[in-house]
Image: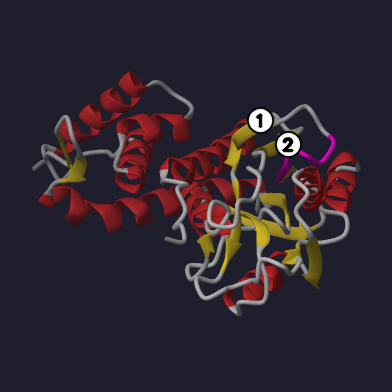
């Protein structure tokens, strides 16, 4: 190897995206370029290093032994590059993201890690709240982007993926046929709750609300076996199952997770692309819930 080689920042960034996503397609989505462009950047980097960094087959993408060795140094190199750029500006870049509390889910740790990997000098501010206050803060310029559900009265924005619902309960949950169905409601202002109640009434199914709380509290009520709840599949507790078919409950509609942003600078666009990719990666995971036999 020529130890006087000069590393190309774009090539190293492309390599890191491939390493993180294990996919040329998703790396291209995260970088906002074509898959061919990612391949070219990686090839140039490998040629400069004189090493094969990525092994690619029709079924999988994985790092070579040399790629695994190079990975931590590549991260340090890109982080140092970003710090050098930030030092000249005199300001750390801030990204202010609002996430509706009923949307906050398993994607968020991956999302934050991806944002930090993309821009090591980034200061990330996350605000959790109801959709209304978040949209007001977004409109007033206090937030750079917000993630809400499509039932929150806005038609614009980028759809991140579907939000699917089911009737969830503990496997041990039981209810006598002559008793009203005990329900756990998400909150008095939740559109999903309102839709679910109307569907039950239309189906002439008697019900009574025995628990009301936010998403995390309702999940705990389900695990405790207190009630059934119309609940997002991706947020359902691991020990809960969909009991809709067993109890003959009406099918629930799906909504969409939506990203709103008004900023158009290149660095913010990269952050937004990273958010979009993370949510869509999680959407690729099956939303099929465990059902009560």
Question: How far from the left and from the top, in percent, is residue 265?
Answer: 67, 31
Please report contact status of discs 1 and 2: CB closer than 8 Å, yes or no: yes
Judging by the rendered image, the residue that carries numbered circle 1 is 158
Image spot of residue 156 (x, y percent) = 76, 27
Name the residue: 48% across, 50% down.
114
Describe residue 89's horizontal placement relative to residue 65 as left or right: right
Neighbourhood count class around disc 1 (C-alpha, 10 Å): few under 14, some 14–19, many 20 upward: some
Residue depicted at x 73% and y 65%: 183
Task: In the rendered view, tell whether residue 241 sits above or below residue 253.
Answer: below
Q: Which element is circle 2 on?
A: strand
**In the displayed structure, would residue 47 be above or below residue 128?**
above
Residue 3 percent coordinates (x, y) = 15, 46
Report whether 134 appears left or right of 84. Answer: right
**Which label sits on residue 260?**
2
Q: Please state, as top left, top right, bottom left or bottom right, where the N terminus lies in the image.
A: top left
Badge 2 density bin: few <14, some 14–19, many ≥20, Cα 10 Å: many
Please give the range of residues in magenta: 148-153
């Amino acid at each position: 190897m020529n130890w006087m080689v000069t590393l190309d920042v774009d090539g190293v960034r492309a390599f890191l995206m491939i390493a993180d996503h294990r996919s040329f397609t998703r790396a291209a989505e995260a970088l906002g370029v074509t898959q061919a462009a990612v391949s070219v950047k990686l090839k140039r980097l490998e040629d400069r290093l004189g090493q094969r960094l990525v092994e690619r087959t029709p079924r999988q993408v994985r790092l070579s032994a040399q790629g695994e060795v190079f990975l931590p140094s590549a991260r340090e190199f890109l982080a140092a590059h970003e710090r050098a750029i930030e030092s000249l500006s005199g300001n750390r870049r801030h990204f202010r993201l609002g996430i509706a509390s009923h949307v906050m889910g398993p994607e968020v740790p991956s999302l934050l890690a991806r944002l930090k990997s993309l821009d090591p000098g980034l200061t990330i501010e996350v605000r959790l709240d109801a959709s209304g206050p978040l949209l007001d803060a977004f409109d007033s310029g206090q937030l750079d982007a917000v993630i809400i559900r499509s039932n929150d009265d806005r038609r614009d924005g980028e759809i991140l993926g579907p939000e699917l619902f089911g009737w969830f309960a503990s496997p041990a949950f039981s209810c006598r046929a002559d008793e009203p169905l005990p329900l756990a409601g998400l909150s008095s202002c939740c559109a999903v709750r309102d839709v679910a109640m109307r569907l039950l009434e239309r189906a002439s199914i008697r019900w009574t609300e025995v628990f009301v709380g936010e998403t995390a509290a309702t999940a705990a009520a389900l695990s405790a076996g207190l009630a059934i709840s119309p609940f997002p599949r991706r947020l359902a507790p691991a020990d809960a199952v969909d009991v809709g078919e067993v109890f003959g409950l009406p099918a629930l509609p799906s909504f969409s997770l939506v990203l709103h942003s008004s900023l158009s600078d290149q660095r913010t666009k990269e952050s937004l692309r990273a958010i979009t990719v993370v949510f869509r990666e999680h959407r690729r995971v099956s939303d099929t819930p465990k059902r009560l036999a």
